[in-house]
Image: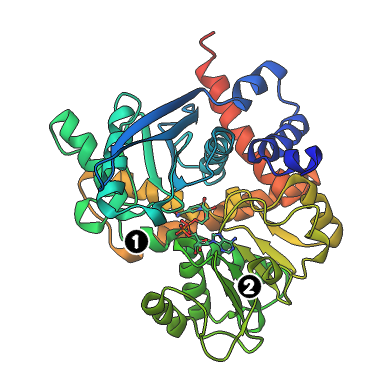
Amino acid sequence: MPTAYLEEVNPWEAQVARSDVAAQKLKLDDGLWRILREPSREFIVHIPVQLDNGHLEVFTGFRVQHSIDRGPAKGGIRYTPNVTLDETRALASWMTWKCAVVNIPFGGAAGGVICDPDKMSKRELERLTRRYTAELMEVLGPEKDVPGPDINTDGQIMAWIMDTYSMHVHHTVTAVVTGKPLELGGSHGRVEATGRGLMIVCDEAVKRLGMSPDRTRVVIQGFGNVGSNAARLMRRRGYKIVGVSTSKSGLYSKNGIDIEALSLYYQRERTLEGFPDSEAIGSAELLLAECDILVPAALENQITSRNAEKVRAKILCEGANGPTTAEADEILVDKGVFVIPDILANSGGVTVSYFEWVQDRQGYFWTESMVNDHLQHTMRTAFMEVLKYAETHKVSNRIAAYMLAIDRVAYTLRQRGIYA
Ligand code: NAD
């Protein structure tokens, strides 16, 4: 791959390309920006795990804490074969900006383990998770760093993290991790939160552009936690979901896909292939299909300088972290695509994680409608604030979101003073 393209698709480079611009527009003091730009702590762990066949394997894991200026570090853990330290750094800083955009009192962190969960048994994943947690005991904690789910990690993995941490400190600490099952201190609405948040910001964008949900066609890349919940909730709201995909296959139907039926089909068959009344389509091709809203909800670097020109959607609502490169941003701006950037669009997940952390610490649990009402209020407010920054400073929605976030973190840091 050419070097320029390799740089374009490096998530850390993609992150700093936008945050540097935002810091310049804010005329942030150079020294202050140097502090905020770099992650504050990075951990690499090599985790021995006994496989079911008796062999010992050593996995490499990361945890990066980008900032604790506004509160405990907060961020997901992903299990993928190609997670890197640079990707984890980017995800950690995106978390700092995301928490600041929705104005919740967390800093940013991210973690990951290089592994392929498709090739591991449940027992192996449990041993991996417990040892990863044990290696990071000193740096995790409700007041220090609170992990949550991300790619290939779910409520069960969060439950093992909570249990391992609790065994080490000899009492139950539910607030050490979010995205737990309900019975273990989880929150109503957390599983759907990121998808619901996407719907809330799409509703706002559609209103603003004078469109209406029932005449809006949506394509969603990814049918995991984020994509499938966004599809289900947006369909119920009246949007017509015309395309969905997973890593293995994709579907398109100009008349709309019956998402409830597809969810049942996917649970049963573990594939989208063969679902009636739709055509098969590749995941990359689906990004360029005819639609009004495109929701990339799978991986980074899906919309790049190589395909941005061919995107046909009016609205790009980023469910995934970093699905669009900085080079593609400029092309989308020229095309007049209304971008709802990742650090705003997918912040519903961390917002409800914050509600979960609050509930765990209070020992008092909210109803689902309370969670959803608070989420709606938080995300609508953030959407308006980002758009206001965009209008005031005459910048794209993405740079506006970064400006709002960096402004908030820098303000806190200035008030606290720098211990240098
Ligand atoms: P997940 O593991 O539940 O699902 C990932 C989905 O992406 C799966 O359906 C997988 O098949 C699909 N996928 C992978 N490669 C693909 C490809 N090339 N084309 C099409 N689909 C592909 O993960 P998730 O939790 O839904 O996370 C998805 C994205 O959303 C990630 O970028 C994650 O960082 C981001 N995110 C997740 C949350 C959350 O609460 N889970 C919150 C904010 C952001």
The location of residue 33, given as percent across then percent down, is 66, 23
**Residue under the point 42% across and 54% down:** 152
Q: Quadrant of the N terminus?
A: top right
On residue 219, which mark appears?
A: 2
**What amino acid is labelled 2 in the image?**
Val
Q: Quadrant of the C terminus?
A: top right
Query: Relative to 88, is 240 above or below?
Result: below
The location of residue 326, given as percent across then percent down, is 75, 45
Determine crowd level at label 2: few under 14, some 14-19, many 20+ residues with C-alpha closer than 10 A: many
Q: Which residue is mark 1?
A: 370
Residue nearest the observer in this picture, 296 or 201: 296
**Residue under the point 77% across and 51% down:** 329
Judge depth for marks 1 and 2 and give the one in front.
Answer: 2
**What amino acid is labelled 1 in the image?**
Met
Labels 1 and 2: the sequence-earlier one = 2
Query: Relative to 403, is 191 above or below?
Result: below
Residue nearest the observer in this picture, 2 or 336: 2
